[in-house]
């Protein structure tokens, strides 16, 4: 007797979610279906694959060894299923998109929807590091993000080059400047978005190189909130140029020490780059 696709899919889902109930919800089947398929798979292997603990299911040594193989098989099943359904024509299916910022991904999504109205799109906003993780974990199909530090297993295509700028409100002493140095900002109220923000990471990394310490940082939940706080004259925000349409009382000003552009890229798993849906989306970025 050989293992079948349902057993492998159930086993992989139980591994990923560390439980049968969550695996069942993800797969859209009953918990008993997942449990039975895993039990049949264990009987076929002749070894116990999971241990039950308070934190959830934990793979046994045998389970870890088997999972290294089934994870790859499951990935191939996914590719095969998508090719069967989507390769010949782009009139059905779903494309999951994640991006570190709304621009320009929303315009690409609109272009894609106009070309392929039968395809369902889902969108999630995530930090630049999480975007790459979601691709590698097969939780997203396409990501638009700053170029990842580690590109192993990813197909990456340049979208555009960007620069980070300071967002300054009218009436501030720096409002009329053509450029601002980080040294000008030492005693200013600096609006910092959450710890996963690429803009914040890049600003703090460059400041550390220069020995600059911001004495009055203010933490906010997101870049849009930082822009709103700057609009209310609570401090100076940071984002990439043209990230949002700024109110009339705000200006985007170059930061001298951050004049080197960074690369915004579109990325997908290397194994998925030739799927029709993904190729169709990449074509919409030309």
Image (cartoon, grey):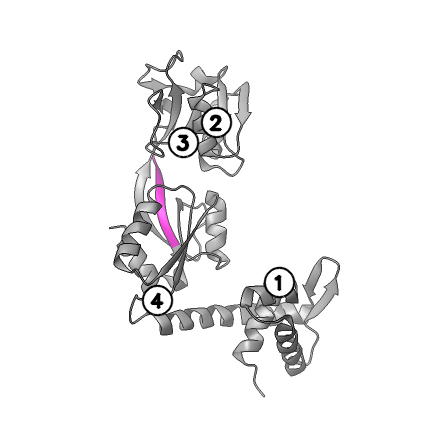
Q: Quadrant of the N terminus?
A: bottom right
Q: Which residues are magenta?
A: 261-267
Q: Foreground mark, 2 or 1?
A: 1
Q: CA distance from mark 3 to mark 1?
A: 38 Å
Q: CA distance from mark 4 to mark 1?
A: 27 Å
Q: Earlier in the sequence, mark 3 or mark 1?
A: 1
| Residue indicated by mark 3 | 239
**What is the chief secondary structure element of the magenta stretch?**
strand
Question: Is residue 109 in sight in this rendering?
Answer: yes
Q: Which mark is residue 92?
A: 4
Answer with the quarter of the image where residue 251 lies: top left
In percent of width and height, residue 99 lies at 41, 46
Question: Is residue 236 in sight in this rendering?
Answer: no
* Residue shown at 61% from the left, 61% from the top: 17
Answer with the quarter of the image where residue 35 lies: bottom right
* Residue shown at 62% from the left, 73% from the top: 34
Kind of element beneath mark 1: helix
User: Crowding at label 3, few (<14), some or many (≥20) Cα neighbours within 10 Å?
Assistant: many
Q: CA distance from mark 2 to mark 1?
A: 45 Å
| Residue indicated by mark 1 | 22
């Amino acid at each position: 007797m050989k293992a079948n696709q349902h057993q492998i899919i159930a086993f992989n889902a139980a591994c990923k979610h560390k439980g049968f109930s969550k695996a069942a919800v993800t797969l859209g089947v009953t918990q008993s279906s997942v449990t039975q398929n895993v039990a049949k798979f264990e009987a076929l292997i002749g070894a116990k694959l999971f241990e039950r603990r308070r934190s959830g299911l934990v793979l046994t040594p045998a389970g870890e060894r088997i999972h290294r193989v089934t994870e790859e098989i499951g990935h191939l099943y996914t590719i095969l299923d998508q090719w069967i359904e989507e390769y010949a024509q782009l009139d059905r299916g779903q494309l999951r998109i994640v991006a570190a910022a709304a621009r320009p991904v929303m315009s690409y999504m609109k272009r894609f929807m106009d070309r392929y109205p039968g395809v369902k799109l889902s969108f999630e906003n995530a930090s630049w590091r999480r975007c790459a993780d979601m691709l590698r974990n097969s939780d997203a199909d396409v990501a638009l993000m700053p170029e990842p530090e580690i590109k192993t297993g990813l197909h990456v295509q340049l979208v555009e080059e960007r620069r980070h700028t300071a967002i300054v409100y009218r009436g501030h002493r720096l409002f009329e400047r053509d450029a601002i140095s980080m040294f000008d900002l030492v005693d200013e109220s600096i609006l910092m978005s959450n710890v996963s923000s690429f803009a914040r990471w890049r600003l703090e990394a460059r400041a550390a190189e220069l020995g600059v310490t911001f004495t009055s940082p203010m933490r906010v939940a997101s870049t849009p909130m930082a822009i709103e706080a700057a609009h209310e004259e609570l401090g100076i925000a940071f984002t990439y140029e043209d990230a949002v349409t700024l109110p009339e009382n705000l200006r985007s000003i170059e930061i001298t020490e951050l004049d080197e552009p960074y690369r915004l890229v579109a990325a997908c798993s290397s194994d998925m780059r030739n799927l029709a849906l993904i190729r169709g989306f990449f074509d919409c970025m030309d």
